[in-house]
Amino acid sequence: MPEAPAQPASHDPRAALDVRFSETTRGRWSDVPAADWNDWHWQLRNRITRLPELEGSLALTPEERAGVILSGNRLAMAITPYFFNLIDPADVSCPIRRQVVPRIEEMSFGPDEMEDPCGEDRHMAAPGLVHRYPDRVLFLVTDRCASYCRYCTRSRVVSGAGGHLDADHEAAIRYIAAHPEIRDVLLSGGDPLLFTDEKIDALLGRLRAIPHVEFLRIGTRIPVFLPQRITPSLVGILRRHHPLWMSVHVNHPRELTAESRDALARIADAGIPLGNQSVLLRGVNDSPEVMRELVHRLLLCRVRPYYLYQCDLIRGSAHLRTSVREGIDIINELRGHTTGYAVPQYVVDGPGGGGKIPLNPEYLLAHDGDRLVLRNFRGDIYEYPEEAPTDSHSAQPVRRRDDEIVCLGLD
């Protein structure tokens, strides 16, 4: 009797995906008990905030050392042990390092750079509450983050090293309650998830009690800087305040570790839709290959790539800014070459308070009133009628490559 064919070994269908997400090593904190390492309070207490701590773990360049010394005059340095261990110490151009280790270039200010590039201060309806768009507000609830991004748009008020955020929660809530056109409230800062569970619950509860507020959003980098904070208790609180959405901030695929993936999964399992907002940064994610890997990993984490921001004209950010042309080229390399869910909207915040302005490759080449000339991701040219003809057989969409016109109608 012939042998029965061998049966395939049973396996976890997600195993092939999980290999992309490695667990972070503890590095210099290898002797720290797991209970401490996984405690978000411990992570905050042991952040790297001073030059001796940083030099004890990383060989700094002269530009970095000078930047750290001067960082207390503008935007403080703080790096959680967890996130610090994502830095490649042998690579002075490490994309994680460029985001959180200060450099002396932060003290060089260009003529077009601003303290408040998004014009938030002049749209401040109440202390800490920005009302720029008709139906939504930005509620800056705190000026502290788990770690500080060196390109921070709010470096004028965040971290306490320079200015301070003059937030008044009571005044902000009164303003929201008095303006029925406000249907959407975005909590940001700083990072709202640094508050205690009780404070988050109370703040969301008060906003949810306002009848015309339809949904709430939280902007946070905690799942990347401090995934230990996404506890079952916190997730249970967030679940109470639906409809609730969350915007996270991931710039490089290396930031999506096993820990951050699991933190994002806990949020998604609570029914909270997740979107990602990246900032286009020189030496971090300014290539189609890195951006493609980032957006693919985000989708594996159930996070929809939402916005790709051109870096704001914040003072001292020139060394991290790219050209707009590079951003458009990256979107051109994504659109049509991967799933549409993976393609973020590339935007620039109009300097001085113009709001988000979409930037796209040129897909609409001409529009003469009767027809549109369009380009697809391959470079093929298409024409489309502006208005539907009265006779359904009198006009047909056409595809044109160079000078050749090919009718797409049925014979």
Image (cartoon, helix red, strand yellow):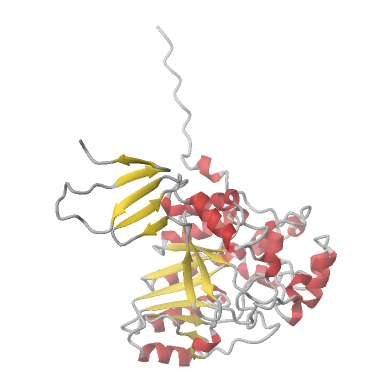
Q: Residue drawn at (59%, 48%), measured in percent from left and top?
A: 289
When asked about the image quadrant of residue 367, the answer is bottom left
Q: Position of residue 116 (x, y in %)?
A: 60, 82
Image-based side of 372 in relation to 333, left or right: left
Q: Position of residue 162 (x, y in %)?
A: 69, 84
Closer-to-camera residue (76/109): 109
Mark yes or no: residue 33 visible: no
Closer-to-camera residue (205/366): 366
Q: Residue drawn at (42%, 68%), measured in percent from left and top?
A: 245
Q: Residue drawn at (37%, 89%), measured in percent from left and top?
A: 177
When asked about the image quadrant of residue 213, the answer is bottom left
Image-based side of 132 in relation to 370, left or right: right
Q: Quadrant of the C terminus?
A: top left
When asked about the image quadrant of residue 84, the answer is bottom right
Q: Position of residue 345 (x, y in %)?
A: 47, 62
Q: State the count of labels.
A: 0
> Outermost residue, left direction?
391
Q: Is residue 38 above or below residue 336?
A: below
Image-based side of 185 in relation to 250, left or right: left
Closer-to-camera residue (228/341): 341
Mark yes or no: residue 217 visible: yes
Q: Position of residue 1 (x, y in %)?
A: 40, 6
> Outermost residue, front direction?
403
